[in-house]
Image (spheres, grey):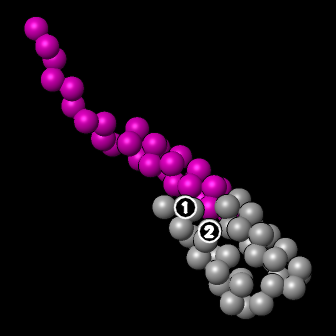
């Protein structure tokens, strides 16, 4: 006899959602810092605005 599994709801689901959200925010903060550092390093190295825009486009393409 198989028991039908009910989806997780209520307090456990809410806790999982909060944990996932907190982890995503932490990851976003770290990732933004890394990306910004790459662009600033290129800028400090003399890259033009167009070159910086191309670098950001490359970073965007790599994230897909």
- Residue 35 location (% of width, % of height): 71, 68
Which residue is outermost to the top?
A: 1
For image coordinates 74% across by 63% down, the residue present is 34
- Residue 10 location (% of width, % of height): 33, 43
Which residue is outermost to the bottom?
A: 49
Q: Which residues are magenta?
A: 1-29
Is 17 rendered above or below residue 33? above
Q: Which residue is mark 2?
A: 59
Q: Nearer the viewer, residue 39 or 3?
A: 39
- Residue 55 location (% of width, % of height): 67, 76
User: SS at mark 1?
Assistant: loop
User: SS at mark 2?
Assistant: helix
- Residue 20 location (% of width, % of height): 51, 48
For image coordinates 57% across by 62% down, the residue present is 62
For image coordinates 48% across by 61% down, the residue present is 64
- What is the C-alpha distance between the residues marked 1 and 2? 6 Å
Magenta stretch: helix, strand or loop mostly: helix
- Bin the neighbour count of mark 2 within 10 Å (Cα to Cα): few under 14, some 14-19, many 20 and up: some
Q: Which residue is mark 1?
A: 63
Taking the image as shown, residue 60 lies to the left or right of residue 55, namely left
Whether residue 26 is visible, yes or no, is yes
Q: Nearer the viewer, residue 47 or 11?
A: 47
Is residue 2 found inside the magenta-colored segment of the image? yes
Taking the image as shown, residue 18 lies to the left or right of residue 46, namely left
- Bin the neighbour count of mark 1 within 10 Å (Cα to Cα): few under 14, some 14-19, many 20 and up: few
Whether residue 11 is visible, yes or no, is no
Callout 1 touching callout 2 (CB < 8 Å)? yes
């Amino acid at each position: 006899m198989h028991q039908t599994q009910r989806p997780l709801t209520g307090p456990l689901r809410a806790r999982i959602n909060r944990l996932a959200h907190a982890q995503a925010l932490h990851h976003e903060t770290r990732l933004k810092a890394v990306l910004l550092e790459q662009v600033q390093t290129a800028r400090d190295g003399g890259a033009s605005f167009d070159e910086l825009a191309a670098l950001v486009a490359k970073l965007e393409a790599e994230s897909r």
